[in-house]
Amino acid sequence: MIGIPSTFKISFRALRVNKMRSALTMLGIIIGVGAVITMLAVGTGASEKISEQMASIGSNLLIVMPGSSTSGGLRMGSGTQSTLTQDDAEAIARECPAVSDVAPTFNGAAQVVYGNQNWSTGITGTTPGVLPVRDWSLAAGRAFTDQDVRNATKVCLLGQTVADNLFGNMDPVGQIIRIKKIPFMVIGVLAKKGQSDHGQDQDDTIIVPLTTAQKKIFGTRFVGMVRAITVKAKSADDLAAAETQINDLLSQRHRIGLRQEKDFTVRNLTQMMEAREQATQVMGLLLAAIASVSLLVGGIGIMNIMLVSVTERTREIGIRMSVGAKTWDIRLQFIIEALTLSLIGGVAGIVLGVSGSKILSALAGWPTVVSPLSVLMSFSFSGLVGLFFGFYPAYKASLLHPIDALHYE
Amino acid sequence: MALIETQHLTKVYELGESTVRALDDVSLTVAHGEFVAIMGPSGSGKSTFMNLIGCLDVPTGGQYLLDGIAVGGRGRDELAEIRNNKIGFVFQGFNLLPRTSALENVELPMLYNGCPPKERRQRAMEALKAMGLEGREHHHPNQLSGGQQQRVAIARALVNRAPLILADEPTGNLDTRSSVEIMELVVKLNRESGITIILVTHESDIAAFSRRIIKFRDGLVVSDEPVKQAQIGDRR
């Protein structure tokens, strides 16, 4: 039996003889592998970005929103009814065992001023629970306490964007800023969080004690009203339990019967994000599947050229048979030739795919991640394509009759 | 024991309705070291006979023993192995691989019997040297004259130390001078190395180099006689 190294040598020679043809045949595989890698990179990039956003929002989150109000038969949409209170939030924290932290929020927008700088930003009134709920830490200073919430102290935490805009390089901690002309002491600066999943700058915010926002900045329709309650479950497994517990508790507190429509909704943020991540992954795989069709087409190109090559080299096959080449010697020769085509194409395709992903990131701003697995996968897939589409021509060659092959003109 | 022994060797082709008896009940033996010329007009069955002797084809009837091995009923790969070990082919059209050096052409048979690369190279060099092609090892066939190409082919036939060389009109594409050169090489191989030669030709002056001439017609052996010494004398 012929050795593999000798066979590779024969293949390289045969491919060198028809340089242009070999290059064009490889092009199919190059484009196929390149497309698969690029598409997988786009898919992986998108879902990694979503995971990142999920981490930035905080994990295992439920959000409780007030229900919709109805005005003259018009239902106004979620959050238009003011039915949630600070007491609800406290009750959830107290009575739902699956819940670890609770942050009722009351928010609005306001102009803030420091010295000759001013900035318009979102103000969120909440409780100290907001930091653990949103997995947020402080870059400087300290957080406010329950005491501050009880006393409606005029203290605030600045998001990075606000700190940069008002203070530049100065340390904001201990300075006094004015929110709607009311002086507030900056006691801390929040760590940078980046964009939310909607592209919103999460650092463009000021956090104040809940009661301060309710009483001193915005005012409320009734005492203790909150716009939403963000709840963190103890773990991912507790999310469903927490959801049920909150539903039961609030239905009871709001005296809602079984048949009645609830005046609040509990939304599972993590679940929503996971669904989005899944959708992105499916999308990415779909793209890769479409791309792999081009790899398949490349494989058909290889088969086509190998069939031509077998016909052209019928005499060579005859000579080899006459001096003792066996069935598998001939098969191996053509299979390895196809394999060489597809593997060289595969390597070039990897280069194309990786640089294509980089270019796509640079030009279109899409996040792309080339995973080693996708490279390995598409490379071995190209090898399989070579084997698969090389086999038939090789099989055909090996079945030639030595005499007919020798006398082929 | 004879090198070649055929018993009632028959090859019948089915061509649609009609059957062609290309070779009809041929029984003959060729001993080790013989030099046989096979002659006959085209369609006489001499090519069919050569294909069968060369294990390139299988008979439809009769038996063929090559060096004591019954060839009948063997598969493709077994036949390939027999060709590799026992038979060297020399063709009219040289049948060298194009764009491949003389050396690699001669190495070809050893590629298929697991000969280690070093030995392969060495034996191929020796075979080329024996054919007077020293210094032409790296020439491609298209850089060699017809006579030189045929000598490369003979080197290839010799390199596996096969006891039998089948030459199918080896001088058919050569001018007279090269033809004589080639035939003298073949005679030398036969005399000095004891290699059995079976040569197909339709030129009687080429056949005259041999010691025995077998004539075919219509698939039958019509004459089988030794070449008279006088004839050899005449040629010289």
Image (tube, grey):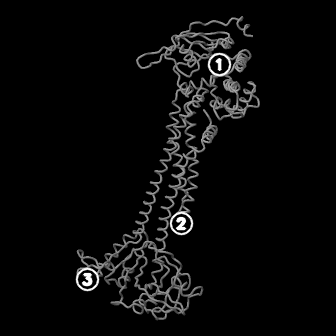
Chain bearing tag 1 is B
Residue A248: percent from left, percent from top: 31, 76
For residue A14, side relative to residue A285 (left or right): right
Quadrant housing residue A103: bottom left
Residue B171 versus residue B71: which sits nearer the camera? Answer: B171
Q: Chain of mark 2?
A: A
Q: Position of residue A371 (x, y in %)?
A: 54, 59
Label 3 secondary element: strand
The answer to whether marks 3 and 2 mark residues whose Cβ atoms lie closer than 8 Å is: no
* Residue B200 image label: none
- Which image quarter is the C terminus of chain A in? top right
Q: Position of residue A273 (x, y in %)?
A: 42, 69
State the residue position of label 1: B164
Quadrant of image for the N terminus of chain A: top right
The chain holding disc 3 is A
**Residue B109 sits in quarter:** top right
Decide: few, some or many residues near mark 2? Use Cα within 10 Å; few <14, some 14-19, many ≥20.
few
Distance of label 3 from label 2 (alpha carbons): 49 Å
Residue placed under numbered mark 2 in the picture: A363
Q: Quarter of the image holding residue B152?
A: top right
Mark 2: amino acid: Leu
Hey, what amino acid is under mark 3? Ser
The residue wearing badge 3 is A71
Identified by mark 1, the residue type is Leu
